[in-house]
Image (cartoon, rainbow, N blue to C red):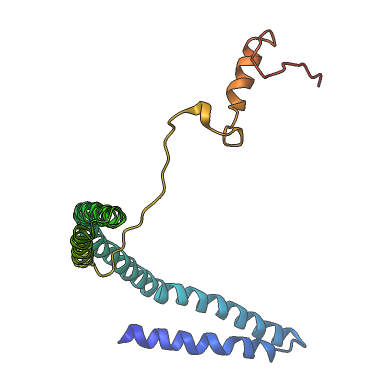
């Protein structure tokens, strides 16, 4: 309580000082002494400010710093847990997506084969009809129509293949990467000269070296 009173007093004294200083008028030795006393009193108040306020400031700073450290420490725990969990989730999603892609590819291949079979039946029916084999042509057309129903059924089944599970708040991105397959096929605009290496070799050989496509010359400075 005593400390609070001292701080309150210091606040009141400090806020009034500029106004008091503005009203000081020095006309004689007496008013000079009074001004000097006021000046010295300001120094005392500054000392009191630090004497009573520094501990408060230091305590608050220490408390603030401890809070920040605690927050950072605590925050690192869920972040660490997320860092452990996310790769597992991604690995699973990649595995599931690969399985889905495989099923879809197999379904598309099956549909394509069924469509090809239907086209072959239609061609066969047309040939039979041209050859006058009407009954056989009608039977083949019926087979082709049945095959179209098979295609529709396979298409519906492909649409029913389940999608990859959704994970709220976590997304997967496909990041384009590249690797060199054949340097001779790479367009010239994508090839960058190693100027540092070339310069080092030329200087080391004191200009007495021939590099295909490179002219070595001397510049006087």
Q: Residue furthest front?
A: 132
Q: In the image, what residue occupies the spot 47% across and 86% down?
A: 11
Q: In the image, what residue occupies the spot 60% across and 32% down?
A: 188
Q: Residue furthest top?
A: 208
Query: Which of these two is toward me, 92 or 149?
Result: 149
Residue 3 x, y percent position in the rendering: 34, 82
Can you say which quadrant of the picture contains the C terminus? top right
Residue 86 x, y percent position in the rendering: 23, 57
Query: Which of these two is toward me, 149 or 182?
Result: 149
In the image, is 36 to the left or to the right of 12? right
Residue 41 x, y percent position in the rendering: 56, 80
Residue 178 in which image quadrant: top left
Can you say which quadrant of the picture contains the N terminus? bottom left
Q: In the image, what residue occupies the spot 61% across and 36% down?
A: 189
Above-or-below relation of 39 to 12: above
In the image, is 180 to the left or to the right of 125? right
Query: Which of these two is toward me, 146 or 50?
Result: 146
Residue 19 x, y percent position in the rendering: 63, 90
Query: Which of these two is toward me, 200 or 49?
Result: 200
Q: Residue furthest right?
A: 220
Q: How many marks?
A: 0
In the image, is 187 to the left or to the right of 83? right
Above-or-below relation of 66 to 11: above
Residue 15 in which image quadrant: bottom right
Above-or-below relation of 91 to 170: above
Residue 165 in which image quadrant: bottom left
């Amino acid at each position: 309580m005593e400390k609070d009173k001292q701080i309150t007093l210091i606040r009141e004294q400090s806020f009034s000082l500029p106004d008091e200083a503005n009203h000081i008028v020095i006309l004689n030795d007496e008013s000079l002494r009074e001004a000097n006393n006021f000046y010295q009193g300001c120094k005392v108040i500054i000392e009191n400010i630090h004497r009573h306020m520094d501990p408060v400031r230091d305590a608050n700073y220490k408390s603030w710093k401890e809070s920040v450290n605690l927050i950072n420490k605590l925050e690192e725990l869920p972040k660490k847990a997320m860092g452990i969990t996310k790769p597992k989730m991604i690995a699973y999603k990649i595995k599931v997506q690969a399985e889905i892609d495989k099923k879809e590819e197999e379904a598309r291949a099956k549909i394509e084969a069924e469509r090809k079979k239907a086209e072959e039946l239609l061609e066969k029916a047309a040939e039979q009809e041209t050859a006058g084999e009407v009954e056989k042509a009608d039977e083949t057309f019926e087979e082709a129509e049945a095959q179209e129903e098979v295609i529709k059924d396979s298409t519906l089944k492909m649409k029913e293949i389940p999608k990859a599970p959704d994970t709220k708040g976590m997304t997967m991105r496909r990041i384009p990467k590249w690797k060199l397959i054949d340097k001779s096929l790479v367009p010239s605009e994508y090839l960058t000269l190693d100027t540092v290496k070339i310069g080092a070799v030329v200087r080391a050989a004191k200009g007495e070296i021939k590099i295909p496509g490179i002219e070595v010359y001397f510049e006087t400075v």
